[in-house]
Amino acid sequence: MTDNKNNQTPRDNVQYVAISPDMLQPQNNPDDEIDLRELWNAIWSGKWIIIAITAIFAIASVFYALSLPNIYKSEALLAPAQDEQQGGLGALSGQFGGLASLAGINLGGGKSDKTALAIEIIKSREFFAKFVEKHNILPDLMAVKEWDLSTNSVTYDAEIYLPTNDEWLRQVKPPKQAKPSMQEAKKVFDELLSIAKDKETGMVNISVEHYSPYVAKQWVDWLTQDINLNMKSRDKQEAEKSITYLQTQIDKTTIFEHKTLLFQLIEEQTKTLMFAEVRDEYVFKTIDTALVPELKAKPKRALIVVLGVLLGGILSVIIVLIRYFASNKTTSDDRETQR
């Protein structure tokens, strides 16, 4: 008997327990599960709330979309004007570049992009201020409320501007004044103006948005004309100053070769003056002129209504689910208290 006990191993003392497949499955707490059927029941029970809220948002979005005035966009496609005199100046860059740079003459050794310069000038505050004063566009920029198709006239906001007396009536806090400043007007204008340059072709698209399609078209035309005049005036002034400087250098030098090069530089600057005089489209040539748009660019009323309906539907479902689970939580808490 004693020998049998001594011969037993630790494995003989192990007790084996049968494990069923169900015991291997993770045990989830029913309270932590979200039943899709329960969600559907919650939504279905609150269907009238969902319908009501969605309908309110839909109606409100329709009224809002209809209250917005139409905005029209006119645009023109421009091409950079070729610089015929650039070739002659480039030929002199290696010979007399130093003196030319003192005279403020670009001989083409470093490529100057007049198109990029013109675009930046259009965006500048100085150009905008002159543009506003020259064409008197401040009322049409800051005070227009809508455009009347039947009379082709703009309607000004009576609380902002009185056109009969050319009087500004805005009620604003200091430092702002009744008449909008150029800084205020520039901000508004920047939102209406769009300038895009195609990197591959070099073409430039200028577009303006406004309540009146005729005003939008007119502003695009004026911008194109004014930037051409501005660049023309700049080049003429630079050429005249350069010629004056070169003539003084001719009087000072006694070297024949230098005088010859100086005369060539004067000749090229004279060509610049000539091109500026004869060209109306000095920096931009119009490829596709601006038209009076027949169709509005904004607002997208259908999109506004669709977004309003979606927002109302999502918000109403969230409200219904919060109400449903809040009420269930209260009910289960009451039951626990009773136990």
Image: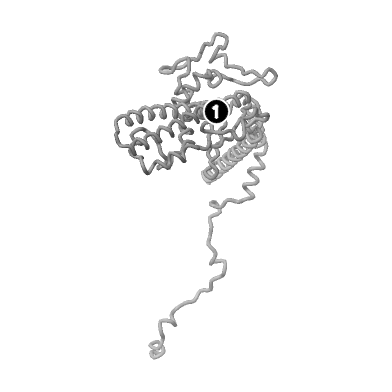
* Position of 75 relative to 163 (above/below): below
The quadrant holding residue 41 is top right
For this view, does 185 lie left or right of residue 144? left
* Position of 235 relative to 15 (above/below): above
Q: Quadrant of the N terminus?
A: bottom left
- x and y, in percent, of residue 242 in the image: 38, 30
Give the camera-side residue of 283 and 15.
283
Give the camera-side residue of 337 and 183.
183
Q: Can see residue 45? A: yes
* Position of 9 relative to 159 (above/below): below
Residue at image point 48% right, 25% down: 128
Q: Which residue type does callout 1 highlight?
A: Asp
Q: Residue furthest top?
A: 165
For this view, does 292 lie left or right of residue 122? right
Residue at image point 53% right, 11% down: 166
**Residue placed under numbered mark 1 in the picture:** 280
- x and y, in percent, of residue 307 in the image: 62, 37
Residue at image point 40% right, 32% down: 266
Q: Can see residue 334? A: no
- x and y, in percent, of residue 42 in the image: 63, 43
For this view, does 301 lie left or right of residue 80? right
Give the camera-side residue of 233 and 308.
233
Dot 1: what SS? loop
Give the camera-side residue of 183 and 308.
183
- x and y, in percent, of residue 17 in the image: 51, 74
